[in-house]
């Protein structure tokens, strides 16, 4: 499915709609589908394409691009970001328009060579404040690194008060008309917006704040995002910017420490250890937010977010087939590897024949550069009262390493 609409008389959006997508980039749920938005800016002398599209939708992309261009050849392709869902059709564009010049950041040019596997690309490297003259329209480039790749930039057209924000302010949300004023399911859009921020932008909160500051310096009526509805002033633009500001805000340094205890338990033994760990942690950190969470009984995405927001955590698993349970690995797969370094973690668990689970988890966490507590609490089969007392002592000892000095 495709959609083409005019944003202004000189700017058109050519969107490929994918309402049936349910998982984006292998790991991100997309209950509401997504769109791959690209744009055409028509100046009095030159034409620029902003972004390309996913390779799987090549025919749909060209159908609406042809309608937008009306037989004209574009002069520039601006790539604000080189992830393959933005660049999948670049090779085909270059075949069709061999004189097309790519406008891109320096790091983006390096990435693009290995995406299209060509070393002869005609790239115009741009950086902060550089401009491109289209005649009666100007494109100004604004560096926006790690939103969410190192190559990301914004493109601003001051004459039209339109900014192209790439993935920033976007959402995996698909409706036939790509403007925010046509959103029919507001609650679903809000959920998609939050999931998108959590999955893509949350690891880069300082850069989100910097990006918002750069946007605030612009006179913007329309924000053209790469996924989801185009945002307009007076409709969703201000609210979405506010949401990003809220979600990316610096945390209060005076808030209580968060020390969750995650576990799974086949017959209740690891659960019993977890409960006594909680008591031990609380004995040293009485003001901390400490609770135990059964990985089987809670939403794993919510627990992953809690893990990433924690100041420290404990993780327990039985040993089955000489390993930790799959649900443990699924939790750790959500670890925010960007900000995980030095996170204190304690490991524990009950086992029967052998007890390798804690050791394997420790190896994974060490690779994430977490600060793994040097001791591991391992109990064979059903814990005795002495074992439970040891679990409480273990929790207290772990808490002592993270207690404010």
Image (cartoon, rainbow, N blue to C red):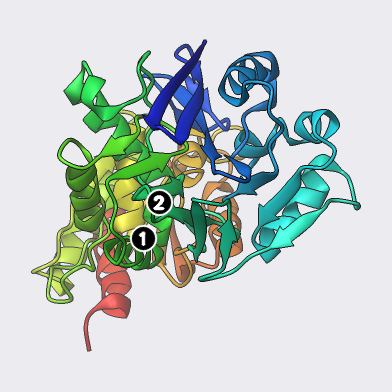
Give residue 215's position: percent from left, percent from top: 32, 60
Residues under labels 2 and 1: Cα distance? 7 Å
Among all residues in the image, which is located at the extreme bottom? 405
Mark 2 nearby-residue class (10 Å; few <14, some 14–19, many ≥20): many
Asked whether the viewer can see residue 342, the reply is yes
Quadrant hosting residue 48? top right
Q: Is residue 13 left or right of residue 254?
A: right
**Residue 354: horizontal and vertical position, in percent?**
58, 43
Q: Position of residue 399 (x, y in %)?
A: 26, 72
Depth check, mark 2 against mark 1: the one in front is: 1
Tag shown at residue 355? none
Tell me the residue that label 2 is attached to: 201
Q: Secondary structure at mark 1?
A: helix
Q: Tell which circle, 2 or 1, labels the residue nearer the N-terminal end.
A: 2
> Is residue 276 something one can see in this rendering?
no
Would you place residue 46 above or below residue 173 in this image?
A: below
Residue 331 or 396: which is nearer the viewer?
A: 331
- Please determine whether, in this image, residue 85 is positioned above or below residue 397: above
Q: Is residue 340 left or right of residue 70?
A: left
Location of residue 343 with respect to 22 vertically, above or below: below
Residue at position x 84%, y 51% in the image: 121
Q: Are marks 2 and 1 in contact (CB under 8 Å)?
A: yes
- Residue 131: x, y in percent? 55, 64
Residue closest to the eye, 41 or 109? 41
SS assignment at label 2: helix
Q: Which residue is mark 1?
A: 208
Q: Quadrant of the C terminus?
A: bottom left
| 370, 378: nearer the viewer | 370
Q: Residue at x 32, y 71 (%)?
A: 398
Q: Residues within 10 Å of mark 1 (few under 14, many from 20)?
A: many
């Amino acid at each position: 499915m495709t959609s083409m609409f005019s944003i202004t008389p000189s700017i058109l959006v050519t969107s490929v709609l994918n309402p049936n997508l349910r998982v984006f980039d292998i790991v991100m749920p997309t209950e509401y589908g997504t769109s791959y938005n690209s744009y055409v800016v028509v100046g009095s002398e030159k034409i620029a394409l902003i972004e390309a599209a996913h390779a799987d939708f090549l025919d749909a992309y060209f159908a609406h691009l042809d309608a937008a261009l009306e037989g004209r050849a574009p002069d520039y392709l601006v790539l604000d970001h080189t992830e393959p869902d933005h660049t999948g059709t670049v090779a085909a564009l270059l075949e069709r328009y061999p004189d097309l010049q790519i406008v891109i950041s320096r790091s983006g040019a390096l990435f693009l060579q290995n995406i299209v596997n060509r070393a002869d690309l005609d790239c115009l490297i741009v950086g902060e404040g550089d401009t491109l003259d289209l005649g009666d329209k100007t494109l100004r480039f604004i560096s926006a690194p790690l939103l969410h790749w190192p190559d990301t930039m914004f493109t601003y057209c001051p004459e039209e008060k339109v900014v192209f924000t790439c993935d920033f302010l976007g959402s995996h949300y698909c409706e036939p008309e790509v403007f925010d004023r046509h959103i029919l399911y507001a609650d679903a859009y809000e959920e998609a917006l939050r999931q998108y921020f959590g999955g893509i932008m949350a690891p880069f909160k300082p850069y989100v704040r910097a990006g918002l500051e750069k946007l605030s310096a612009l006179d913007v009526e329309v924000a053209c995002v790469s996924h989801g509805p185009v945002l307009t002033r007076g409709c969703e633009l201000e609210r979405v910017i506010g949401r990003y500001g809220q979600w990316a805000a610096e945390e209060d340094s005076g808030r209580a420490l968060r020390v969750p205890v995650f576990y799974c338990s086949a017959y209740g033994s690891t659960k019993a250890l977890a409960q006594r760990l909680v008591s031990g942690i609380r004995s040293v950190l009485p003001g901390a937010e400490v609770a135990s969470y059964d990985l089987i009984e809670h939403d794993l995405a919510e627990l992953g977010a809690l893990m990433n927001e924690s100041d420290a955590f404990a993780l327990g698993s039985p040993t089955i087939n000489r390993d930790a349970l799959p649900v443990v690995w699924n939790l750790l797969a959500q670890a925010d590897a960007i900000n995980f370094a030095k996170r204190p973690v304690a490991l524990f668990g009950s086992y029967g024949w052998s007890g390798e689970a804690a050791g394997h988890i420790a190896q994974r966490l060490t690779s994430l550069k977490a600060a793994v507590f040097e001791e591991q609490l391992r109990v064979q089969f059903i814990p005795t009262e002495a074992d439970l007392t040891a679990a409480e002592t273990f929790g207290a000892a772990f808490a002592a390493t993270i207690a404010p000095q």
